[in-house]
Image (tube, rainbow, N blue to C red):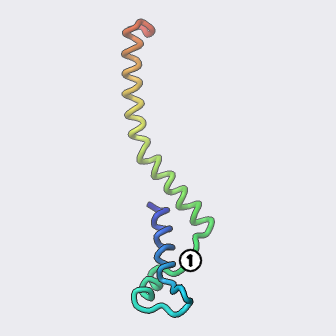
Amino acid sequence: GPIGLDGFSQLFGYYATPLGGGEAVGVQALLGNIFPLRESTPFLRAFTGALFGFMLVWLTFPHLEQSMGRTEDDLERKLTRIGELPD
């Protein structure tokens, strides 16, 4: 997501910069216009990391909640069967 977008934009910026320090031509010049050579600022790194973390929790929480609900039901059924929980 956001971290990949930031990283790829930097990657293409590096490809657009000639190794010898000369002037970019052709595809390199086009890439240089779209993705200029840059580094992420600490704010951008923190923002994309926080956005990634939020999205990860948002996507995984429903699966964890569903799984824990099934585990709770199984455990309740087993404990009732052995007499540890009242009916």
Q: Please tell me whether residue 59 is drawn above or below residue 7 in the rendered image.
A: above
**Whether residue 77 is situated above or below residue 49 in the rendered picture:** above
- Tell me what residue is drawn at x 42 percent, y 44 percent: 60
Image quadrant occupied by the N terminus: bottom left
Q: Nearer the viewer, residue 61 or 26?
A: 26
Identified by mark 1, the residue type is Arg
Residue furthest toward the top?
83
Instruction: Please tell me which residue is depicted at 56% across the width and 61% down the height of the picture.
Output: 47
Q: Quadrant of residue 34?
A: bottom left
Image x and y of residue 54, in percent: 49, 51
| Residue at numbered disc 1 | 38
Residue 18 in the image, given as x and y percentages of width and height: 51, 86
Q: Report the side of 39 relative to 1 (left or right).
A: right
Q: Dot 1, how many residues are within 10 Å of its Cα: few (below 14), some (14-19), or many (20+)?
A: few
Q: Residue at x 45, y 8 (%)?
A: 84
Which element is circle 1 on? loop
| Count of numbered labels shown in the rendering | 1
Q: Position of residue 17 (x, y in %)?
A: 51, 84
Looking at the image, the residue that sits furthest to the front is: 20
From the top left corner, tell me how far across and down residue 86 is, in percent. 42, 8
